[in-house]
Image (tube, rainbow, N blue to C red):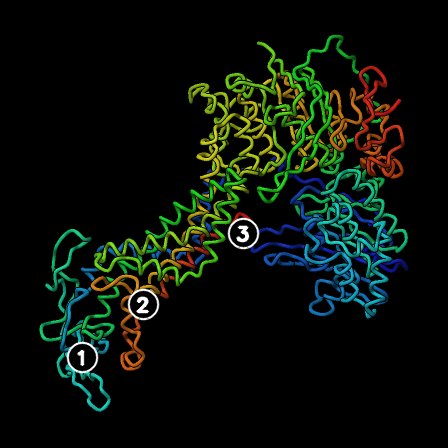
Amino acid sequence: MTLPHAEKPNLPVLSVRNLSIRFGVSKPVLQEVFFDIHHGETLALVGESGSGKTLSCRAIIQLLPKAAEVVSGQVIYRGGDAECDLLKLAGKPLRRLRGGCVSMIFQEPMRSLSPLHTIGNQVGEMLALHSELSKPARRQKVLETLARVGLSDAERAYKSYPFEMSGGMRQRAMIAMAIITEPEILIADEPTTALDVTTQATVLGLLKDLQKETGMAIVLVTHDLGVVANMADKIAVMESGQIVESGPIAPVLSAPKHSYTRKLIAAAPVIPEAVACKPEAAEPDYILTMRNVCKSFSLRASKPWQKATTITAMKEINLAVTRGKTLAVVGESGSGKTTCGRIALGAMQPDEGGEVHYCPRSGEMVELQHLDKRQRCAFQQKAQMVFQDPYSTLNPRMRVREALFEPMEIHKIGTPAEREARACEILGWVGLKPDMLDRYPHAFSGGQRQRLSIARALMMKPEFLVCDEPTSALDVSVQEQVLALLRDLQARLGLSYLFISHDLAVVASIADSVAVMRAGVIVEQGPVDQLFRNPLHPYTKALIAAHPEPDVHRPMDLNAVAKGAGSAAGWPEEFRLTEGKLPPLVTAEGSHLVRRFG
Amino acid sequence: MSEHFARPETDHPSEENDQSLGRDAYLSTRRLFFRRFRRHRLAFISAIFLIISYVLLPFVGFIAPYTPNERNSDYLFAAPQSINLFHEGAFVGPYVYATTGEADLTAFRWVYTADKSTPQKLEWFCEGGDYRLAGLIKTSTHLFCAPEGTTVFLWGADRLGRDVFSRILYGAQLSLTVGIIGIMISMTLGLFFGSIAGYLGGTPDYLIQRLIEILRSLPELPLWLALSAAVPSHWGPVTVFFIISVILGLLDWPGLARAVRAKFLSLREEEFVRAAEMMGATRSRVIRRHLLPNFSSHLIASAALSIPAMILGETALSFLGLGLRAPAVSWGIMLNDAQNLSSIELYPWTAIPMLPIIFVVLAFNFMGDGLRDALDPYQH
């Protein structure tokens, strides 16, 4: 690396060398981690959860957990003319460094701002700690910085509390807090993982602009190679505490040398540039149809005598899932996609007038909006759900055996021996071993738990599965495995999926047709190839543009994101959603529909 | 770092290493919980102390050298006696010295002098006052007692010449069980109201919440006083004891009900509960199989933390003379004797019953803390 020829005029502002950290007496969790970063550069630390990327960047400012012990290593910081080892700092110099020369942005914008203080107060605190400015001067500077991070009404942002802001705005406020002291190094720990894809794109764009203006160095921790390709100049890939590959971004991504890097790149979801045209069945055989489904919730007021407020979660939804195919519903949080999934399973009743029909392979069609007890029982065996959070989807008090048997117990199907045989068979399908039946959920990783969740859904030989963001809590490489499993099961068992996701790239790899939802309405729907080849709606375009591709030659198109991802009232006239005036869904081409006037 | 570096490939176990999980994978959360609890040294010791205390309760009559209301009029306010092993350098085994009391008429107090010339060896498995072992078997055998003509007052005697040590042991029977009975009542009520509020929500929740707030706003001590003053004076000590426990339980449930409600609300959001509902599980199955197992341990922890309040409540009531009444023996009743400032000054051992109260209350608090920490999955 740069060690032998350190006499170059342009020395790195930060060099981490041979950093090893361990907990207690166990084997080190970080082994000889090293990286350099120059002014104006972005270094991406990439790896799966548990690979030690967060630990290495926290070590820079000594924000390690108490049990962690630095075994060896140096963190050389060259600010101005001085050069010092950050690991040896303590007390006042350390406090001066934190937030002053090295700032940090955390992952969760909801939790990293104090709910009790205004944004202005929290951002200003950094100045109060790190500068000699007078109070009015501080206020002036905070307002300038808030404006600079793209909070349009800085005056209002200054006075608001975190709960009054959206996730993206909070992350902008966090960034303002980090850059107001003009640090030389900014550590961003998964800064956009908790954000919607369009918000992520704008926040990443902002970071890039700020870097251009101030020339700060950014250490970007992420698991998303797409983000890396769009942001970084250099990359360091970490696996179980070691850097397995590092170097400038282009060669690493285009010609990876290490098998782990290759694996990560292969797993990264990509929006296809061209999707093959699949022939549409002449007479589609729908397993589930939703016709004119609306759903409004009445929010119970805090006092029983107050009037309830009504919120419309979805309006005029018309969807159909073809037997043996996958329909994906895509949208940001709050777009009504989860409600859609619950209605499809009969767990929620649509408003008066909506119809949800389910046609089993054999037997008669049932109307989910008025099921009687016997029909509901039969339907629940045929339709199952896979949930989002692998950590809460299994009861921690139940062994895998009990969890898998539960659906059969509820419906009183099979003898214990038959249940056991079925469970073993299905564990094999999802890639787990039958001897895991007696384990408890805590003994499984996130990906394995999601496999168990799928196994539980399969116990009843269902025909229809609703997958509610089954991969969004998983690492990229595990996500690809779970998606492959779902595709494999579909081919083997002829399952039909209603796949709910916020990520168009995930959808591209599994869906046959897609419906894009925004603010409770479908703005565009159609076969997956047509939708990606020819997106018509500005919101769909924004979603596609905002997805960071793991390819340096396909940068995000922030312009398209800005056009489509803003409020629905800011769309071009023909697409605009205004109160009481909903543009109709019109046919663009075949079964490709878009919501617009004219 | 301007170069493209790649670490040479090593054999990385690509699959998760199942061996590292070992036996843990097959341990239930309950077993893991016990293992974590055992690591909590102070809590574990407290738990053992409490278990021993409760196990010994039926057999205190055997351990105590005297029966609770046995009076020795020659030994009013006798000072604590020590048990010695060696007399003038020679081993004689556990013995006491005989003491004789004399009234000091200038200071108006009893003064006891020990006859240090002859050691009086303690007798083992000797005959003493009658008592019922475990409340059933009538017997008069004691573990140890003083030889004829002497006394063994380990922690002194009170104003009627009764042995404080024996009375503390007997007092434990009532003082320790009052908390258990109280907590059972409070848990039943708390579980019932808490789960109704948590599961049904809406108006029942609203009403129960307000009821809890009203109960919590009442000043505790006057309310206890009023309720126990209402107990007719002719009722027997056992009835009074039971009523006191019920009163303490009735006033304690709001805290537990709140804990149950909060846990219910958070568990209902868990996806495994929704998954069970979507599979078609009935309400009672969801509660039985998914909700209760997941919060029973929480319930035990919060119950352990509220027992001390009950024990202190009983003590406070009896201290004020409104709880249990003689001839019943409880720590509070014994402290009632120590109300008089001059008697504490002259005979400080009459306040010794405070020590077991402090120890038991601390032990319950340590154990409750330990339980709670061991239950917290984010601890390790």
Ranked by sequence position, the earlier of labels 1 and 2 is 1
Q: Secondary structure at mark 3?
A: loop
For the residues labelled 1 and 2, the Cα–Cα distance comes to 41 Å
> Do the residues marked 1 and 2 share a common chain?
yes
Task: Point out which mark residue B319 bears.
Answer: 2
Q: Is residue A257 visible?
A: no
Q: Amino acid at mark 2?
A: Phe
Of the two numbered discs 3 and 2 in the rendering, the one whose residue sits closer to the viewer: 2
**B344, above or below B292, in the image:** below
Ranked by sequence position, the earlier of labels 3 and 1 is 1
x 82%, y 28%: residue: A581
Q: Place residue B4 in its image quadrant.
A: top right
**B103, above or below B251, in the image:** below
Of the two numbered discs 1 and 2 in the rendering, the one whose residue sits closer to the viewer: 2
Q: Which residue is mark 1?
A: B87
Q: Which residue is mark 3?
A: B379
For the C terminus of chain A, the quadrant is top right
Taking the view exactly as shown, the residue that stands out farthest to the bottom is: B106
Mark 1 surroundings within 10 Å by alpha-carbon count, few (fewer than 14), some (14 through 19), many (20 or more): some
Q: Disc 3: which chain?
A: B
Give how far across and how far down residue B340 sits, in percent: 30, 77
For the residues labelled 3 and 1, the Cα–Cα distance comes to 55 Å
Q: Secondary structure at mark 2?
A: helix
Give how far across and how far down residue A559 sits, in percent: 89, 38
Q: Nearer the viewer, residue B79 or A256?
A: B79
Q: Disc 2: which chain?
A: B
Q: Amino acid at mark 1?
A: His
Of the two numbered discs 3 and 1 in the rendering, the one whose residue sits closer to the viewer: 3
Answer left or right for B232 relative to A65. left
